[in-house]
Amino acid sequence: MNQLIQNLTGMGGMTDQVIATDFLISAKSGIRNYAAAITETATPELRMALREQLKAAVETHERITNFMIAKGYYHPHELSEQLNVDLTAADTALNLAQK
C-alpha cells in the first residue's frame, strides 16, 4: 500500500500484517469449506477435483503462515509473543476508531 495512504489512515506498517492476517483467515476458511464439500460430493471426479483444490489451499496456507512468521506477524508456537502482537493490533484498531 502507498505510504501516504498508510500514514493518512494511521495504519503505518500494520497494513501488510492486516492483509496477511485476513488472507490467512480466508485460507483457513477455504480449507474447511473444501473439506466439508468433499464429504458431500456424490461423484468421484468432483471429489478428486475438490481434493486438488484442498491441497492447493493447504499449500497456500503454509506459504502465508511462513511469510507471517518470517515477518514477525505470527507466532504460532509462542503464545506470549502472539499475545503481544494481537494486543498491539487491537490498540491500533482502537486508536483508528477514536480518530
Image: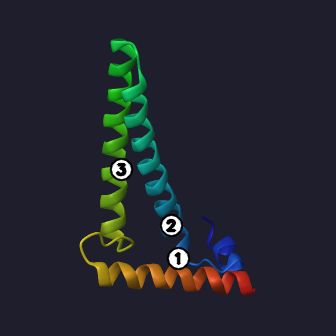
Residue 68 x %, y %: 36, 65
Q: How is this picture coloured?
A: rainbow
* Residue shown at the point (34%, 61%) measured from the top left: 67
The quadrant of the rendering that contains the N terminus is bottom right
**Where is 50 relative to 98, above or below?**
above
Q: Position of residue 98 (x, y in %)?
A: 73, 87
| Residue at the extreme left | 77
Seen at 41% across and 43% down, the residue is 32
Choose the circle earlier in sequence order: 2 or 3.
Answer: 2
Tell me the SS state at disc 3.
Answer: helix
Labels 1 and 2 touching (C-beta < 8 A): yes
- Crowd class of label 1 (few under 14; some 14 to 19; many from 20; radius 10 Å): few
The residue shown at (31%, 73%) is: 75
Per the model, the C-alpha gap separating discs 1 and 2 is 7 Å
- Residue position marked by numbered label 1 in the rendering: 13
State the residue position of label 3: 61
CA distance separating discs 2 and 3: 16 Å
Crowd around label 2: few <14 · some 14–19 · many ≥20 (10 Å): some
Task: Determine which of the numbered discs, if any, sits on residue 67 in the image.
Answer: none
Circle 2 sits on which residue?
16
Indicate which label's residue lies in the foreground, 2 or 3: 3
User: Which of disc 1 and disc 3 is earlier in sequence?
Assistant: 1
